[in-house]
Image: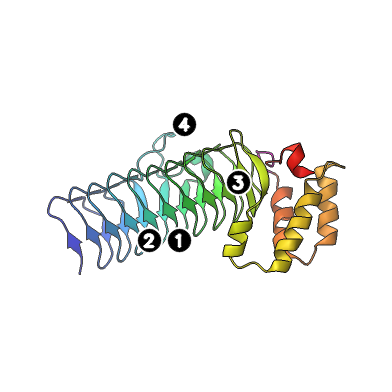
Amino acid sequence: MSQIHPTAIIEDGAQLGADVAIGPYCSIGANVALGNGVVLHSHVVVAGRTSVGNNTQIFPFASIGHNPQDLKYDGEPSALEIGADNVIREHVTMNPGTQGGGMLTKIGDGCLFMIGAHVAHDCHIGDHVILVNNATLGGHVEIGEWAIIGGLSAVHQFVRIGRHAMVGGMSGVENDVIPYGSVFGNRAHLSGLNLVGLKRRGLSRDDIHDLRRAYRLIFAPEGTLQERLADVSDLFSGVEPVMEIVEFTGVDSSRSICQPLLEDAA
């Protein structure tokens, strides 16, 4: 049975799934769709063309689905899609897409957005991603599943962050981060592989060993990056995690690849 507090405001046209719980002083717009079992704690605002997946929880003072902060936004009917089983903590902000980015901001399943995190227009976030307190994403950012964005970090618009990557706290990320990579720093640099995350995700010892070997070859000082990628592709053609890095790095992107410091690459 749904539980809706009498002070909540639900506009005509809003779609509510079964067994939702809507707390005091929440506001739900006319074009919002809440899935089954969604919980809005007090003072949550969900606006715009926003859908929230089953069993997602949104905590007080989150602002979900209001107009993007992109000055080019001109009222186009863009959307925000939030998957199932997410936890969206206090003061999180999420904006819908824009005409210039496909009209959609999309969040996967099972993510955690800690206090004050921001997801800008046209971002695409995979499953099981964590944004730690006050992590900030610029527009058009893409984040692969199981990645973690550390607290007080800022990710530049159009940056891609690969699966299982780790961004250390208080980092400024302006370049693409390879899958399984670990970066940190003001104007973040690649500091190695996210070995803790790889072990937590159950990668085999052999795969981790091959990833470490491939990492050293990809970021070696000799030759061009494309030459090194070709060599790694030949040597590790049957190793899926390594080939994921090769394919990610070979994609034509508006941002360059985040590199290690010279002493770290040696």
Residue tagged 4 = 72
Report if residue 255 lies within the magenta region. Answer: yes
Comparing marks 2 and 4, which lies closer to the viewer?
2
Is residue 168 found inside the magenta-colored segment of the image?
A: no
For badge 3, the amino acid type reads Arg
Provide the residue designation for mark 3: 160
Name the kind of residue labelled 4 in the image.
Answer: Lys
Q: Which residues are magenta?
A: 253-257
From the viewer's perspective, is the residue at label 3 or at label 4 nearer?
A: 3
Q: What is the crowding at mark 4: few (fewer than 14 residues within 10 Å), some, or many (at least 20)?
A: few
Q: Few, some or many C-alpha atoms within 10 Å of disc 2 (few <14, some 14-19, many ≥20)?
A: many
Q: Residue sitting at 64 percent across and 55 percent down? A: 180
Cα distance, mark 2 to mark 4?
29 Å
The tag earlier along the polypeptide, 2 or 3, is 2
The structure residue drawn at horizontal position 70% and vertical position 58%, both measured from the top left corner, is 244
- Residue 53's disc is 2
Where residue 228 appears, as percent x and y from the top left, is 83, 49
